[in-house]
Image (spheres, rainbow, N blue to C red):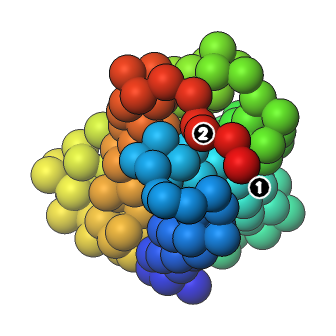
Amino acid sequence: MVFWVPLIAWALAIGLALLMSWRGPHPFSLALVVDQLLRYILLLPVGLMGLWAFLGHVFFPGQAAASIGWAPSPFQFEVGMANLGIGVAGVIGAFFGSPGFRAAVGIVALGFLGGAGIGHAIQIEETGNVASGNAGPIFYTDFLTPLAVLGLLLIQRVLGPVPQR
């Protein structure tokens, strides 16, 4: 399951963003597509994945640790609580967040997820840990997700507001 969740979250985010853009004002605008993609990345890869990681680390720490190739640790509760905060902020940012709020979510996610990604890289190099929760898609999405949020915010700033119907 750990292998598929990041891939499903990203596929749904892209699919929903395209669907909602298609249903939006016509003709299409790049600003609309960027806005929708940002919303659904915040909702799914940031928000729901954060909540999923919270549930795993807090309520199923043995399974979560095993999927990463680690032994269970009391620190998983802290990791889970950080995921809870990022997940809730992602869900709020998806539909109610200002650009500044969304940037803050992206920066916090970059610090936490980017740091986790670096930790995964170190584990792969030093111990050969290629468990799906360490070296699978989560390794790549730890970097991709916050960089996508921040990159889309930058593009959104350059493009200006979304045209209204």
Which of the labelled discs sits on residue 140, or is there none? none
> Within 10 Å of the Cα at label 1, are there few (<14), some (14-19), or many (20+) other Cα atoms?
many
Residue 125 located left or right of residue 100: left
Q: Considering the numbered disc 2 on the image, is that residue within a helix, a strand or a loop?
A: loop
Q: Position of residue 121 (x, y in %)?
A: 24, 48
Residue furthest to the top: 100
Placement of 19 over or under 59, stated as above or below: below
Circle 1 residue: 51
Q: Where is residue 17 in the image (x, y as percent from the top left)?
A: 56, 64
Circle 2 residue: 163
Give the residue drawn at x 71%, y 49%: 165
Q: What residue type is labelled 2?
A: Pro
> Within 10 Å of the Cα at label 2, are there few (<14), some (14-19), or many (20+) other Cα atoms?
some
Placement of 128 over or under 153, stated as above or below: below
Can residue 136 be seen at all in this image of the molecule? yes
Mark 1 vs mark 2: give the one in front: 2
Placement of 28 over or under 20, stated as above or below: above
Q: Position of residue 75 (x, y in %)?
A: 67, 39
Q: Are marks 1 and 2 in contact (CB under 8 Å)?
A: no
Give the residue drawn at x 63%, y 21%: 99
Give the residue drawn at x 14%, y 52%: 125
User: Which one is nearer the viewer's eye here, 123 or 136?
Assistant: 136
Can residue 70 be seen at all in this image of the molecule? no
Q: Which amino acid does label 1 sit on?
A: Leu
Q: Which of marks 1 and 2 is nearer the N terminus?
A: 1
Residue furthest to the left: 125
Q: Quadrant of residue 115?
A: top left
Q: In which quarter of the image is residue 56?
A: bottom right
Give the residue drawn at x 76%, y 29%: 97
Q: Position of residue 9 (x, y in %)?
A: 57, 70
Residue 124 located left or right of residue 131: left
Q: Distance from label 1 to label 2 (Cα)?
A: 32 Å
